[in-house]
Image (cartoon, grey):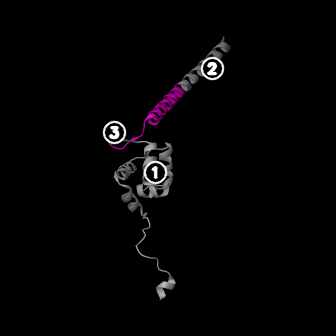
Amino acid sequence: MQKTMRRLRRLQRQVKSLRLEARAQRRIVAGVERRFSRLKSRVLRTGVSAGPGRPLTPQSIRSLRERLGMPRIEFAKLVGVSPGSIFGWETGRTLPRGRSVARLRDVRKMGVRAARGKAGRRRARRRGGRKTTRKTARR
């Protein structure tokens, strides 16, 4: 009789510990599901809002950069972020946040000349007349 009671108590302790473990696992799973649903809703979004009715999607960021005719390095200088950030935004791996969104809105409003001027890129202009060489300059 005592032997069976010991076995029964041992089984009761095991069941109790298994219940506690199962409860902890359910909490963990619920937390993971919450995080997953947040990530899923973030991925399903078309992009970050860039004003009324104009979201900043990866395609819109890339088309803006291409419209300005800039490589990622120059565009990154213009926006004030790293070229890696531009790559992440254009591929959809990351989303611009905070000040970057505001800067992208400002760049979107700029014209091509203004953006190139701000980025420090100027096109070489030809001046009228002939080129002077060393020989002609000495005469």
Q: x and y percent of residue 67 in the render? A: 43, 51
Magenta span contains residue 115: no
Task: Measure the alpha-carbon separation of dots 1 and 3.
Answer: 22 Å
The segment highlighted magenta reads 23-51
Say which mark, if any, is on residue 53: 3
Q: Is residue 87 left or right of residue 48?
A: right
Q: Nearer the viewer, residue 30 or 67?
A: 67
Task: Give the amino acid type for the residue marked by disc 3 in the picture.
Answer: Gly
Label 2, on which residue?
10
Q: Secondary structure at mark 1?
A: helix
| Dot placed on the residue nearer the N-terminal end, 2 or 3 | 2
Label 1, on which residue?
66
Q: Residue at x 63, y 14 (%)?
A: 5
Q: x and y percent of residue 75 in the render? A: 45, 55
Q: Secondary structure at mark 3?
A: loop
Q: Nearer the viewer, mark 2 or mark 3?
A: 3
Q: Is residue 112 above or below residue 4?
A: below
Q: Secondary structure at mark 2?
A: helix
Task: Measure the alpha-carbon separation of dots 2 and 1.
Answer: 71 Å
Q: x and y percent of residue 93 in the render? A: 50, 43
Q: Residues within 10 Å of mark 2 (few under 14, many from 20)?
A: few
Q: Residues within 10 Å of mark 1 (few under 14, many from 20)?
A: few
